[in-house]
């Protein structure tokens, strides 16, 4: 399916301009809308490519700029600092997430009644936090995401279905974190499914993960089989609920 892309800009309450990447089917009409929250690096090619791949499948997708001015780094120290500024300011992170969702829904090509979100690494945390706040998302998929809540989900708060795609060899988000998440979701009576991929490390969906890890001394790794299967699992979920 042929697609088109454009930059969607909006401004938060601090005056920061966010410049997100919107991809959508060229054929016209309204499509189910998907927010794509990137890894801690910023608005990377991986995030933008994910939005474009979704558009090729018939979705309207917005790869969101969480840092402002489409900021991007290859330095893990800088990435960590940028991420923690938002983790330590959850109100601003929630605002930027909601602004991105609002911008996505406002696009003429988006069907705001059929709304989902996916996230990678830090972005996984971003979209799961949105779900915990009760955002009306029909589906949320986290790929090697940070599963620790700022505060646990309340019973009945999560509106849609959650899909957690996790690498068994992930040393940044451990299996203990996965089990804690499972307990949280069961207590919240959420609908969720967890897939654990053997031989997959943190970052397994990103073709640049191994290089990024070697460059920064971080335990990251691309795993093609897990990347392909986890993406298909997401598409299956979307086909069912969107």
Image (tube, rainbow, N blue to C red):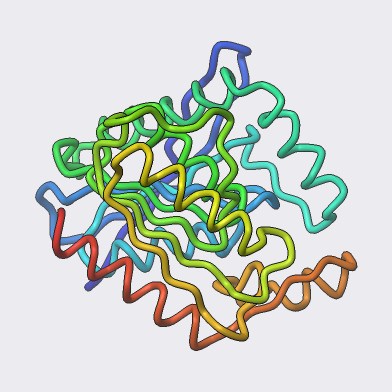
Choose between 173 and 67: the one closer to the eye. 173
The answer to whether residue 222 is above or below residue 129 is below
Choose between 38 and 73: the one closer to the eye. 38
The answer to whether residue 47 is above or below residue 62 is below
Count every numbered label the image shows and give the total: 0
The answer to whether residue 72 is above or below residue 164 is above
What residue is at 49 percent from the left and 78 percent from the top? 227
Choose between 141 and 102: the one closer to the eye. 141
What residue is at 35 percent from the left and 50 percent from the top? 140
On the rendered structure, is 91 left or right of 185?
right
What residue is at 32 percent from the left and 37 percent from the top? 104
On the rendered structure, is 83 left or right of 133?
right
Residue 17: image x %, image y %?
Answer: 58, 25
On the rendered structure, is 192 left or right of 126?
left
Residue 88: image x %, image y %?
Answer: 71, 25
- Which quarter of the picture shows residue 175? bottom right
Residue 45: image x %, image y %?
Answer: 58, 62
Residue 182: image x %, image y %?
Answer: 45, 53
What residue is at 74 percent from the left and 29 percent from the top? 85
Choose between 87 and 69: the one closer to the eye. 87
* Quadrant into which the N terminus falls: bottom left
Among all residues in the image, which is located at the extreme left? 29
């Amino acid at each position: 399916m042929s697609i088109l892309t454009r930059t969607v800009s909006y401004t938060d309450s601090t005056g920061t301009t966010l410049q997100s990447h919107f991809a959508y089917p060229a054929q016209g009409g309204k499509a189910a809308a998907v927010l794509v929250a990137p890894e801690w690096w910023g608005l990377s090619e991986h995030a933008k490519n994910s939005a474009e791949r979704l558009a090729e499948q018939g979705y309207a997708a917005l790869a969101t700029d969480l840092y402002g001015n489409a900021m991007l780094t290859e330095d893990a120290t800088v990435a960590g600092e940028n991420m923690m500024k938002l983790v330590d300011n959850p109100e601003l992170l929630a605002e930027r997430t909601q602004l991105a969702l609002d911008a996505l829904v406002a696009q003429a090509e988006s069907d705001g009644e059929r709304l989902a979100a996916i996230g990678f690494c830090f972005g996984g945390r971003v979209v799961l936090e949105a779900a915990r706040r009760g955002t009306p998302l029909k589906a949320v998929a986290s790929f090697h995401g940070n599963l620790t809540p700022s505060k646990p989900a309340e019973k009945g708060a999560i509106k849609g279905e959650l899909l957690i795609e996790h690498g068994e060899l992930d040393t940044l988000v451990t299996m203990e974190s996965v089990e804690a998440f499972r307990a949280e979701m069961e207590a919240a009576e959420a609908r969720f499914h967890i897939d654990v991929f053997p031989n997959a490390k943190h970052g397994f969906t990103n073709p640049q993960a191994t290089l990024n890890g070697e460059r920064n001394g971080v335990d990251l790794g691309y795993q093609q089989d897990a990347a392909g299967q986890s993406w298909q699992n997401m598409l299956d979920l979307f086909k069912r609920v969107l």
